[in-house]
Amino acid sequence: MSCVSDSSGLNKALRQQYLNLPQGGFCQITYIWIDGSGEGLRNKTRTMDSEPKSIADLPEWNFDGSSTGQAIGSNSDMLLIPVSMFRDPFLLDPNKLVLCEVLKHTREPAESNHRNCCNKIMEKVKELHPWFGMEQEYTLFGVDGHPFGWPRLGYPKPQGPYYCSVGADRAFGRDIVECHYKACLYAGIKICGTNAEVMPSQWEFQVGPCEGIEMGDHLWMARFLLNRVCEDFGVVASLDPKPMKGDWNGTGCHTNTYRESHRETEKAACRAYSCLRPTRW
């Protein structure tokens, strides 16, 4: 078996004893943002006196950008601007997870803040009501960098039996996949499916349909939850596009897009087909 992290072996029953303690009416809010790499996710948590009902109830916050690749040490304060709120599947209600945009101290978007530009474009085309669906593939690894479930020496059997598979010799890490799915549903993410992929220990989840900027918000929060669930199990989820050299499947994120006119065309085609098909098969 692949090496798992030491923290995953801590006493979870003892941990649960503390998680079950009442919060005294307070609420824990975890702020989440994309770091300077444009790929990594960071987070930190604060206490609020009551449960926020909307983004408007959440204050701005700040962090040290010199430690996340987003600022120099001599002027490192960066601002966290809440943009999307979700239920917290780890600390449970009334606690929240909040996706944030990052601004410089001048209130200009950080270089890694691509959401700001994307949102401006989505606002310009909002009358088209663009829908998106994204299919995110990922690969599970041990903390030692070895693919989860792969033999310590050599390789698993060639690709073929792993896609949408079932069985201990074919599906590696299903516990993680199912926990991530449930966490997304609890959080309010528009996750719509999951399946095992072509390479062993490779999986995919799908998010959507989402309209406009909501697509990016839900996908990034689903990625955060994936990494957070993997942390509990002591493994690592990689989005590397070619995680293993040789005749092994690559990993991608496929995008599907529709606008309102496309949806109306499809509806009309379906209605026409319904009229033409026989009533009895």
Image (tube, rainbow, N blue to C red):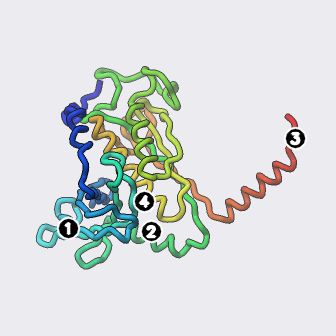
Q: Mark 1 or mark 3: which comes first in sequence?
A: 1
Residues at circles 3 and 4 in contact by the CB criterion of under 8 Å:
no
Foreground of the two, 154 or 110: 110
Residue occupied by mark 4: 217
> Hey, which quadrant is residue 178 in on the image?
top left
Kindly identify the amino acid type of the residue bearing the numbered disc 4.
Asp
Q: Residue at x 17, y 63 (%)?
A: 66
Q: Is residue 108 left or right of residue 119?
A: left
Kindly identify the amino acid type of the residue bearing the numbered disc 1.
Ala
Kindly identify the amino acid type of the residue bearing the numbered disc 2.
Cys
Q: Secondary structure at mark 1?
A: loop
Circle 2 Cα neighbour tier, 10 Å, few/some/many (<14 / 14–19 / ≥20): few
Residue occupied by mark 3: 279
> Hey, which quadrant is residue 260 in on the image?
bottom right
Q: Is residue 207 left or right of residue 102?
A: right
Which numbered circle lies on residue 118? 2
Q: Residue at x 24, y 29 (%)?
A: 3
Circle 3 Cα neighbour tier, 10 Å, few/some/many (<14 / 14–19 / ≥20): few
Q: CA gap, disc 3 to disc 4? A: 43 Å
Image position of 21 with respect to 130: above or below? above
Circle 4 Cα neighbour tier, 10 Å, few/some/many (<14 / 14–19 / ≥20): some
Image x and y of residue 214, in percent? 48, 61
Image position of 101 with respect to 242: above or below? below
Image x and y of residue 98, in percent? 34, 60
Please give the count of numbered marks on the rendered protein.
Answer: 4
Q: Mark 3 or mark 2: which comes first in sequence?
A: 2
Q: Mark 2 or mark 4: which comes first in sequence?
A: 2
Q: Secondary structure at mark 2?
A: helix
> Nearer the observer, disc 3 or disc 2?
3
Which numbered circle lies on residue 71? 1
Which numbered circle lies on residue 31? none
Q: Residue placed farthest to the left in the image?
A: 74
